[in-house]
Amino acid sequence: MEATAIQDMERVTDTFKALSNPIRVAIVRQLASGPRAVHELVDALGVAQPRVSEHLAILRGVRLVTAVREGRSVTYHLVDEHVAHIVEDAVIHAGETH
C-alpha cells in the first residue's frame, strides 16, 4: 500500500477511535444542528463541564470539531457535514433489527 494511502487509513481509524465514546457521539449529534458553547452542551447532555471539555479536546485533536472564540466565549462547530452523516448513519444502523 502506498504511504499516502496508509496515512489516509490512519486518519480514518483515528476518526473512528474518537467516535468510539457515547458522549463524543452525542456531542457530534448536538453540533450537527449548529454551533454550541460548552455550557449549552453541558445542559443538553447532562454531563459535567470538565468531561464535556475533555471530549471536545479529543474531537478537536482529530480535527472533527473546531473552536471559534467570540469575545469571552468559545463556540464549537463540526469541521464539516461528513462527520454528522457518519454518526447519523451509525445511529440508524444500530437501531435496525436484522
Image (cartoon, rainbow, N blue to C red):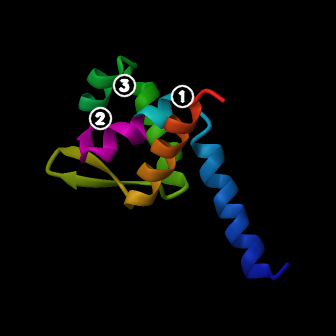
Q: Position of residue 5 (x, y in %)?
A: 74, 76
Quarter of the image where the N terminus is located: bottom right
Circle 2 or circle 1, nearest the eye:
1
- Pointer 3: residues within 10 angstroms few (<14), some, or many (20+)? some
Q: Quadrant of residue 73?
A: top left
Q: Are circles 2 and 3 on residues that touch, CB within 8 Å?
A: yes
Q: Secondary structure at mark 2?
A: helix
* Of the pair 36 and 50, the residue shown nearer to us: 36
Q: Position of residue 32 (x, y in %)?
A: 33, 46
Q: Which residue is mark 3?
A: 49
Query: Looking at the rendered structure, which numbered label has been put on residue 34?
Result: none
Q: At label 2, which amino acid type do we have?
A: Val
Element marked by disc 3 = helix
Q: Dot 2: within a 10 Å radius of its alpha carbon, few (fewer than 14), some, or many (20 or more) residues? A: some
Q: Identify the residue under disc 1.
A: 95
Q: Residue 32: within the magenta?
A: yes
> Marks 1 and 2: in contact by CB < 8 Å?
no
According to the picture, the residue beneath numbered tag 2 turns out to be 38
- Measured in 3D between alpha carbons, the distance from the residue under mark 2 to the one under mark 3, in whole angstroms, is 7 Å
Q: Which residues are magenta?
A: 27-38
